[in-house]
Structures are given as C-alpha cells and as structure tokens.
Image: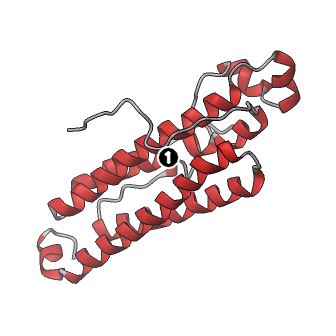
Amino acid sequence: MWTYEKRLQYPVNIKTPNASTAKFIITQFGGPDGELAASQRYLSQRYVMPYNEVKGILTDIGTEELAHMEIICAIVHQLTRNLTIEEIKASGFDTYFVDHTVGLWPQAASGTPFSATVFQSKGDPITDLHEDMAAEQKARTTYDNILRMIKDPDVIDPIRFLREREIVHFQRFGETKRAISSNKKAYKSSGYL
C-alpha cells in the first residue's frame, strides 16, 4: 500500500541542541493536536467514507501525517542529542530523561502520555470531516504557538513547513466535505442521511 522513502519529507538539520525547546515541541508528536493523533484519526476514518476519492484523500493525508511525525521526532532527537546530565537538569528535561532517556515517546508538552481519546472517528463522513478540519486548525495554532517561543532558525524552518501543511490539509478536507454534501443522493444511499 505504501512506499517508504528513507528520507524526511522536509529536512531537519539542527546544529544547537536545546532540551528546553524539545520539551514543548514533543507535543506535536504525542499531544492532543499532534501528528500521531492526526495520522490515526484519518487512517481510521477512511473506511466509512462513501467514495474511493474521499478514502484516498484520507489515506494520503493520514500517510503524510506519519511523515510529519517523523519530522517532529527528528527535531526532538536533534534537540536532545549529546546533552550532558547538567544540561538536561538545567533545561528541566530531567523528568522526561528519567523515564525515557532521550528516546522518543509520545506525550504532550505537559507530560501527559498519548491517548487515543484525543481523536474521534464517528463513522459519519460529514461529522468526521468537520472533526478533521478542526484538528488541522488546532494543529496550526499549536505550530503558531511553537513559532512564538523559538528563535533558532534551524528549528523554525521545518516547523513553518509543518504549519503550512496544516493549512493545505484544512483546505482539502473542506473541499472534500463540500463534495460529499453536494452529492446528497449518493450520500443518502450510503446510509448517512
């Protein structure tokens, strides 16, 4: 089904580790509006969509969200590599370090572990597409907040790329929702109206 290219969708090359920054960027891995939740949301919802084209859009975007999760993990990894214990303690990364060293583990910036409760799959295409549009806006807002907090151009560059993709996904879901809504006969025959 998928072809995996062994390279990131967008390059990450962070020269200066910074565990303080990693502490909040990790939320886009396992937080409530992060890439893991998005990938699982879309890849789960695709099965009830009434048209193959819509299933394809959810598959495409869900797969891309997996690629975005890889980018976030690369950012967090590069921000935490080769740190001394003193740097880890000084940055406040010590509480994470105790449980995970510098391994990647999905959690929110608050430290709350990833949970499937942060996404929905209702089984109604219009409801699910509204959920998807809202999820993309929440992720964009999270990226906006991250951009307000960082100064390192090596981190800002891939975060901006990810933010832009949230906008594109929002637009695609909106187009998809309108296409389903406009074809009420096919939508009704699928059992949703």
146 and 158: which is toward the camera? 158
Residue under the point 41% across and 33% down: 7
Residue placed under numbered mark 1 in the picture? 35
**In this rendering, would 82 be left or right of 164?**
right
Image location (x, y in percent) of residue 156: 66, 50
**In this rendering, would 192 be left or right of 173?**
left
Q: Categorize mark 1 by other alpha carbons within 10 Å: few (<14), some (14-19), many (20+).
A: many
Amino acid of disc 1: Glu
Residue under the point 74% across and 58% down: 148
Q: Quadrant of the C terminus?
A: bottom left
Depicted 167 relative to depicted 63: above or below: below
Depicted 23 relative to depicted 99: above or below: below
Image location (x, y in percent) of residue 96: 72, 27
Quadrant of residue 191 within the rendered picture: bottom left
Depicted 88 relative to depicted 163: above or below: above
37 and 81: which is toward the camera? 81
